[in-house]
Amino acid sequence: MTVPILHRSTVLVLNRHWLAIDAITPVDAFGHLATGSARALRIDDTSVQPFDWEDWRELDIPATAPAIGTPHGRVRIPTVIVLTRYARVPMVRPVFGFRGLWERDGGRCQYSGRELRPDEANIDHILPRSRGGQDCWENCVLADRKVNTRKGSLTPEEAGLRLLSVPRTPMPVPATARIRNSWGIKDWEHFI
């Protein structure tokens, strides 16, 4: 099943200083535009122009630009919006789970140091869950599936393994560092 374009995070959000802080859906972007909390950017080869909601609705829509139908006619879907009042760059902490551990551990097995492909890796509980180990940053590491299978329900010491480093909760990073242009949107290249 494919996600409809209105529900994909295809709109880059800039704070009022034009720093990228988030990626949201067109549905959310239209909400910001309609309430006046943001302006849409029209970006072409020679200029970047901000538009408020009323002016944005009146723009001509190039044949290649995505648009939606409304009772008042078609409206272009913005690729970038600028918040009118928000100035901060929020700090975000990675979410605990496979992806967060992958980022924290750099895609390396924390026992062998080997660089892994995602299908070669899994989460190892240093103190196994069967022995009271918790699902938390300090008790979980990225491990090679083969190494983790061999370790089983043993502690690293019991299995003859050593951790490369002590696992810790990752520090928060600016939201800008976590934005990925996974849809390959050309207009985003100006800001990330």
Image (cartoon, grey):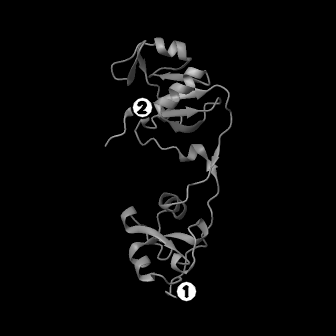
Q: Nearer the viewer, residue 40 or 186?
A: 40
The x, y position of residue 13, in whole percent, is 55, 33
Above or below residue 59? Residue 88 is: below
Of the image marks 2 and 1, the number of the one nearer the N terminus: 2
Q: Position of residue 171 (x, y in %)?
A: 64, 57
Assess disc 2: are there few (<14), some (14-19) or many (≥20) residues with their C-alpha within 10 Å of its C-alpha: some
Instruction: Identify the residue under disc 1.
Output: 157
Q: Is residue 4 above or below residue 122?
A: above
Indicate which label's residue lies in the foreground, 2 or 1. 2
Q: Secondary structure at mark 2?
A: helix
**Which residue in the protein does label 2 denote?**
6
- Name the element at disc 1: loop
| Residue at x-position 64% and y-position 25% | 84
Q: Amino acid at mark 2?
A: Leu
- The residue drawn where x is 56% and y is 17% is 52
Amino acid marked by disc 1: Glu
Q: Is residue 67 left or right of residue 47?
A: left
The residue drawn where x is 52% and y is 65% is: 105
